[in-house]
Every structure is written in structure tokens, then in C-alpha cells.
Image: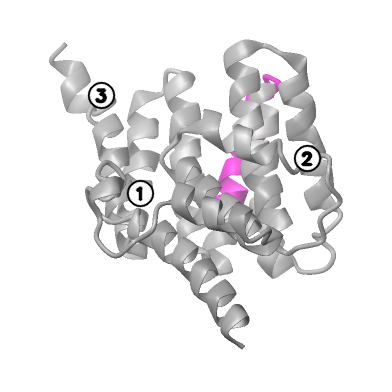
Amino acid sequence: TKLKQNILHNAMSSFRACTMLLRPGAYENASTIKGIKTFDELRQIAYNTHNEHLLWHVDIDEMLVKFWFKEYIPVTRISERYRSSKSKRSFELLRRFYDGITSFAFARDTNVASWTQIGEESVAYWMNFISYSKWNFENKLLLLQAEQSYTNGEYTEAERFYEASILSARQHRFMHEEALAYELYGMFLCDRGMADKAWEQLNKAHQKYIEWGALGKAAHLNNFMRWVDPKYLQNM
């Protein structure tokens, strides 16, 4: 029917906007991209038509984009709308994944225990699913556990989890999540003052993002990498 076609079209528009924004320069100039509805426009359509399915798609797609570009405040604002719900949608797994990593980052920045609790709840949630599919879920759980250990000051354990997550993502062919694990591992090493090793991991992340085709994300990471380039640090 025409209604179903419109629902599918708008959901795919949200996904298209998500993928387009990972291209070079697109995220910074999102409002100027022709033929692509913004997340706010799609969300308004969802409100006007009382379409909860579309609203969920729009929220999770915007959450994904904000997450990849490390705008964690919008990520957690979107996620908190769903924390008290008992959603059974498959995207709930992704929401919990992004929410967990974001919450651990806020916990480290603020020392507020409630952020740690949200992160730990995400770890527990993912542990319930690992028995269903090690292939799909293992690398994500390991990365959450790495961030949890990092937050708790268990640095040796954190390194072990980061490296295990990278290996699992590679073995199970989740290239974008292998890149993410390299990136977060590099950030962890930066914080630990291990500049050379951090640069090595971030450079691997950069290459994987390029392989994935997310050139905009690769450029975003490259802007940060300039500040931890060993050659730059030597000349300071």
C-alpha cells in the first residue's frame, strides 16, 4: 500500500542520511546536501504521522552518526529516551552498545557513579546475548569490557580486552568495529602517556576507516592524530 511505501521510504531516507554523513565533508555541511532529508525533518514526519517505527529508525541512525563523530552528549540524550523501555527491536543491541561506551567516557570525565552504572548495565545486557552468537556479539562485548576496565583503573585488563576485541572483530569481519576498537585503544594509550603505541593504534584505525569507505570519519580521526603524531611531539 501507499502508506507502507511511505514508511519504508522514510526509514530508508534515514539510513541514507546516516551513510551519506560518513563521506568527506558531509557531516560538517549536512544541511547543504541536496536530496537528503535531515534527521530533524524525518523526526517531524514521524511525530506528525504517529509513526514510532520511523522515529526509532531516525533516532538510532542519528545516534550512530553522532557516536562515530564523538559527539557524545547528543548520543546520550537520544539514548536516554529508551533506557526505561523494554524494546525488543534488534536495534536495541546497538543502542546499548553506543550507550555503554558513551557512558563509560562520561564516567571517566566526570567521576559521576551513575554513568558507570549505565555502562555496567550495558555490559550485563550484552553478556546475555553472547551465547546466542559469538560471531555477532563477541567483539562488541569485549570492547565494552575494555572501556569498563579502563574506567575502573584496571589498565592491564583493559589492554587485554582492547586487543581481544580487535582480534574478534577482524576474525568475524566487522571492519568498522575493528577500526573503532583500534581508535578507542589508541585513545586509552594516549591517556596513559604511551604516545608511540597510541599513534600506531590510531593509524591502524585510520586505515580501517578508509577501507570501510567512511572517509569523512577517517578525516575526522586524522585531525586528532595530528596532535599525537610522534614527529609533531618531538618538535614541540
Q: Which mark is residue 227?
A: 3
**Which residue is depicted at the point 50% across and 42% down?**
67
Is residue 5 placed above or below 95 in the rendered structure?
A: below
Q: Residue furthest bottom?
A: 1
Pick the residue in front: 219 or 163: 219
Q: Residues within 10 Å of mark 3 (few under 14, many from 20)?
A: few
Image position of 102 (left or right of 122): left
Q: Quick one: label 2 or label 3, which is nearer the N terminus?
A: 2
| Residue range corresponding to the magenta coloring | 152-166
User: Which amino acid lies under the numbered mark 3 shown in the image of this protein?
Assistant: Trp
Measure how far apart labels 3 and 1 are at the Cα level: 16 Å
User: Which amino acid lies under the numbered mark 2 shown in the image of this protein?
Assistant: Arg
> At which x and y percent is residue 136?
67, 66
Q: Are marks 2 and 1 in contact (CB under 8 Å)?
A: no
**Which residue is depicted at the point 26% across and 50% down?**
26
Magenta segment, prevailing SS (helix, strand or loop)? helix
Q: Which residue is denoted by mark 1 in the rendering?
A: 204
Residue 11 is covered by the magenta coloring: no
Image position of 164 (left or right of 215): right
Residue 158 is covered by the magenta coloring: yes
User: Total number of numbered labels?
Assistant: 3
Is residue 163 placed above or below 192 in the rendered structure?
A: below
Q: Which mark is residue 83?
A: 2
User: Which amino acid lies under the numbered mark 1 shown in the image of this protein?
Assistant: Lys
> At which x and y percent is residue 114?
77, 20
Which of the image's four quarters has the N terminus?
A: bottom right
Image position of 43 (left or right of 234): right
> At which x and y percent is residue 69?
41, 40
